[in-house]
Amino acid sequence: MHELNELVTLRSMTAFEASDITAGNRPREGWADDFPGNGDAIAARYFQATSTRAKPWRASWLILVNGIVSGTVGFKGEPRENWLEVGYGVVPSQRHHGVATTAVAKLLAMVAGRGISVRAETDTSNVASQSVLRRLAFEEVGRRDDEGSPLIVWERRLDASL
């Protein structure tokens, strides 16, 4: 995991990259062949709608693996009642190697010690994403139905010792 921690970095998405991702333009030099995916367009649209990126929850972050853009991670909006919702996605060519776990851990470190809880939702069939959250000490706190899609709700309270 230590080696992966050095290979996986986060970089704030640029306006130019957000435009390309939203338009479905690909591939760009430095992007994985299978980037962007469907979820990446959501992150890019959020970036475009956010006027200020001074705080970590106001940015969409690109996940780079050994310098190659391989996914996105970010919070879905401003803190609500002391909690944030995280979203993430990694291209198929980089899945099952710990990339998502490492990227989400790096994002959580940006808000650690602020007395914030972080939530996530996964489809009940998305075992890989559930595994990411379990490895990061998220606990299942409920279930809900989103227009016929059953979801699991996860939460983790962050403290200074992330």
Image: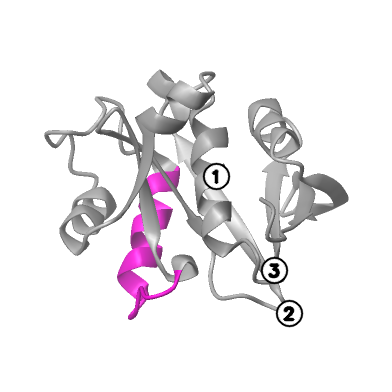
138 to 15, vertically: above or below:
above
Query: Mark 1 touching mark 3, by CB under 8 A?
Result: no
Q: Quadrant of residue 112?
A: bottom right
- The answer for how far apart the CA atoms under marks 1 and 3 are is 15 Å
Q: On the image, numbered disc 3 is attached to which residue?
A: 116
Question: Dot 3 lies on which element?
Answer: loop
Question: Dot 2 lies on which element?
Answer: loop
Q: Is residue 140 magenta?
A: no
Give percent across and percent down for residue 83.
70, 69
158 to 124, vertically: above or below:
below
Q: On the image, numbered disc 2 is attached to which residue?
A: 81
**144 sits to left or right of 85:** right
Q: Earlier in the sequence, mark 2 or mark 3?
A: 2
Q: In the rendered structure, which amino acid carries the disc numbered 1?
A: Val
Q: Nearer the viewer, residue 39 or 16?
A: 16
Q: Quadrant of residue 64?
A: top left
- Please give the range of residues in magenta: 39-55
Q: Nearer the viewer, residue 151 or 133?
A: 133
Q: On the image, numbered disc 1 is attached to which residue?
A: 104
Judged by its main secondary structure, the magenta piece is helix
Q: Residue at x 35, y 65 (%)?
A: 47
Give percent across and percent down for residue 143.
85, 50
Q: Earlier in the sequence, mark 1 or mark 2?
A: 2
**48 sits to left or right of 16:** right
Q: In the rendered structure, which amino acid carries the disc numbered 3?
A: Ile
Give percent across and percent down for residue 22.
28, 54
- The answer for how far apart the CA atoms under marks 1 and 2 are is 21 Å
Q: Residue at x 54, y 23 (%)?
A: 1
Question: Dot 1 lies on which element?
Answer: helix
Q: In the rendered structure, which amino acid carries the disc numbered 2?
A: Glu
- The answer for how far apart the CA atoms under marks 2 and 3 are is 9 Å
Q: Is residue 50 magenta?
A: yes
